[in-house]
Amino acid sequence: MKKYFILGTIALFCMNWSTAFAGGATQASPASSVDPTAAISAVQHFGNKALDVTKTTGAAAEAAFLVLIKEAMDVRAISEFIFGPVWKKASDSQKDSLVGLYEEVLVATNIKRFTEYAGATFEVKSNTVPRPKGIAVYATIKVPSKPDIQIQLTLIQTSQGPKIVNLAVEGFVLLVNEREQWKNVIKDVKGDVSAFIDRLKTHIAKIKEQNGRTS
């Protein structure tokens, strides 16, 4: 049986890492605090669309999930934070490549996970918690015949409205886990941007192969 996280512990993780994120992610440039109603609406839209992905398979599901990620998440701000040392050295075109590749990583690593949520419903709670330059929204994924899954999402205000920059579910905290995962890779390539981009491409290809896809 999967071990479901304790929401209070995850909230503490998210608070600490959201503070660090707010100080380090200059590209996000949140102009103001996030309106709670807008944040709740954005999270509900994200949850509904994510569950819609479970109704399709293969390339169609991947394409739909990629569109959702581009729409709902500030992947540029997330990439800046988790790829920190490499991001600082990257040219504008290399930064665009890093963002595009990380979007592919998010799709490749999560597409199969979402199949476990087939038939589920996504319920957003009405309470929100302010975060440095952002807001935390709580939701529950109700999967038939399985324990409810608690999820916390942190959003910041952008020129396109509230965007997700962090999420915590089943003990996984996006900013924490991803920064730790790529830290050693960045160290291994000695911060070389081109070499790191090559590693990202290799990583994506391996995941797609594991998922039964080659492109």
Image (cartoon, rainbow, N blue to C red):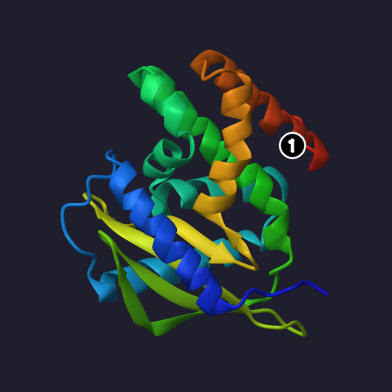
- Which corner quadrant holds the C terminus? top right
Note whether residue 144 is visible: yes
Say which quarter of the image contains residue 3.
Answer: bottom right
For label 1, count other residues whose C-alpha is less than 10 Å away and answer few (under 14), some (14-19) or many (20+). Answer: some
User: What percent of the width, then of the height, locates residue 60?
Assistant: 64, 47
Say which quarter of the image contains residue 105.
Answer: top right
Q: Amino acid at mark 1?
A: Lys
For residue 165, side relative to residue 39 (left or right): right
For residue 18, side relative to residue 168 (left or right): left
> Looking at this view, is 156 or 186 the one in front?
186
For residue 105, side relative to residue 93 (left or right): right
Q: Relative to 8, is 177 above or below?
A: above
> Looking at this view, is 133 or 108 the one in front?
133
- Which corner quadrant holds the N terminus? bottom right
SS at mark 1 in the image: helix
> Looking at this view, is 194 or 125 the one in front?
194
The residue located at (25%, 59%) in the rendering is 133
User: What percent of the width, then of the height, locates residue 186?
Assistant: 57, 26
The residue located at (81%, 40%) in the rendering is 210
Q: Relative to 214, is 31 above or below?
A: below
User: What percent of the width, then of the height, locates residue 166?
Assistant: 45, 57
The residue located at (69%, 69%) in the rendering is 117
* Image mark count: 1
User: What percent of the width, then of the height, locates residue 85?
Assistant: 44, 28
Note whether residue 164 is visible: no
Q: Which residue is mark 1?
A: 208
The residue located at (59%, 50%) in the rendering is 177
> Looking at this view, is 205 or 59 the one in front?
205
Say which quarter of the image contains residue 119.
Answer: bottom right
